[in-house]
Image: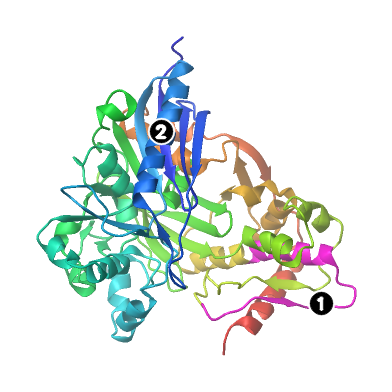
Amino acid sequence: MRRGPALVAIDQGTTSTRAIAFDLAGKPIATAQRELPQSYPAPGWVEHDPERIRDDAIKVTREVIGAAEALGHPVEAIGLTNQRETTVVWERASGRPIHPAIVWQDRRTAGACAELREAGHEERVARHTGLRLDPYFSGTKLAWILDRVQGAREAAERGELAFGTIDSWLLWCLTGGTVHATDASNASRTLLYDIGDGEWRPELLELLRVPAAVLPEVRDSAGDFGETRADLFGRPIPVRGIAGDQQAATFGQAAFEPGGMKFTYGTGAFALLNTGSERLTSQHGLLTTVAWQLGGERTYALEGSIFVAGASVQWLRDGLGIISDAAETEALARSVDSTGGVVLVPAFVGLGGIHWDPGARAALLGMTRDTGRAEIARAALEAVAYQSRELIDAMQADGAPRPRRLRVDGGFTRNAWAMQFLADMLDLEIARPAVTETTALGAAMLAGLGAGLFADLPGVAALRRRDRAWTPAMEPRVREELYAGWQRAVARVLPN
């Protein structure tokens, strides 16, 4: 029985490769997933096997296409979303990667970034790219590969090599090497792309010593990215959407208007606030990025990151051993009226957000003889809300519109107590969607838009369904007293 078209999203993340098929109402039909191992060949280094990523992506996509079509949903298009800054370089002739993929978490180019900062280049890089000189981004990773693999730089200059983030690599593989392209959201994370002009910036290529010949073509986030090889899935299937994971999640949350904002709460947390056609330059530690590009027009966003969100709960379980399951924290938080003055600053890997301080270290402050595991668990949950407020306050200080509500997703949002405290601390409505796989949903929506299955953004927005919302209920005086306590605690962990 034919039940209507389906869209497949390939969601290639840091620890897994997934494919999800959605119907045109945005409802998941079928899912398949493979875990992705990471390797750590040296301190601070993190790598993936690009060929494992390729093979797993094909396998899970094949599974969900088969499952969807068995249910009567013919797959009309594919969308890709990906871990954004992870870097791959491969031979154009053979399609063979010349080095393992260097993952976004990798810090091996920290020294190179420091040298560029000390030489006075950070302001120029930020002006063109909206980014900081940090090994997080892919440009210095690409230069490292070209310098360290024998003969790579010469081959790159001859046009024999191709560079891409994971979306470009998968697109190349799916199309049999016929399409070497990316979208503007992924290009904006490379340190090489001018987000104002919408093109690779020659002076940045020169600064990072990257030959233009290795770069992919930058296209709209929804549009024609070619077709898959016929032998992969039984017939050619159009690829019609690409976006980096955080931008795809923002699209999946239908945050299409300026001021629309989403916060993804997982191990860490990422906030994107839509600023429309206005490209705001942050003076408060945030990044300016391309949210998506449609019809040649770029929509911009401010982005902030929290290094530790749900990871604090993991620490309570695995480090302190005071809980056996993350779900216990909700009951513990409800069992006490307050933390009794206890504040956790979860700077286990430094502080992100507005601080960008790798030297900060975690601290549990304000304990007394009466402090127990309930107070500590509640402090871990409260810290997520305090860090979220830091980012939202910084966005407003940078001139961004205040969101009317905050759209949230990620595993941490299952904790209803934490979501109510978030609403109280931000003085905003918190809205959780019915479909929590917003990253994959965003990629599928982009593919549907690119395939002409959705007429416009309002048609896409109609697919979003709310699961639950929380509204502020805290007295302003209490809110400000609690936040002031957090600020005092952060001041104590930052290096002098």
Circle 1 residue: 367
Location of residue 299 in the rendering, given as x and y in whole percent from the top left corner: 35, 51
Q: In this view, does 403 lie to the left or right of 9?
A: right
190 inside magenta stretch: no
Out of 76 and 430, give the one closest to the viewer.
76
Location of residue 22 in the rendering, given as x and y in whole percent from the top left corner: 47, 29
Classify residue 127 by image quadrant. bottom left
Which residue of the protein is positioned furthest toward the top in this rendering?
A: 1
Label of residue 98 in the image: none
Q: How is the image coloured?
A: rainbow
Distance CA(mark 2)–CA(mark 1): 51 Å
**Amino acid type of the residue that numbered disc 1 sits on in the rendered structure:** Met
Q: What element carries label 2?
A: helix
Q: Which mark's residue is nearer the viewer, 2 or 1?
A: 2
Q: Is mark 1 on a helix, strand or loop?
A: loop
370 inside magenta stretch: yes
Q: Give the range drawn in magenta.
A: 358-386
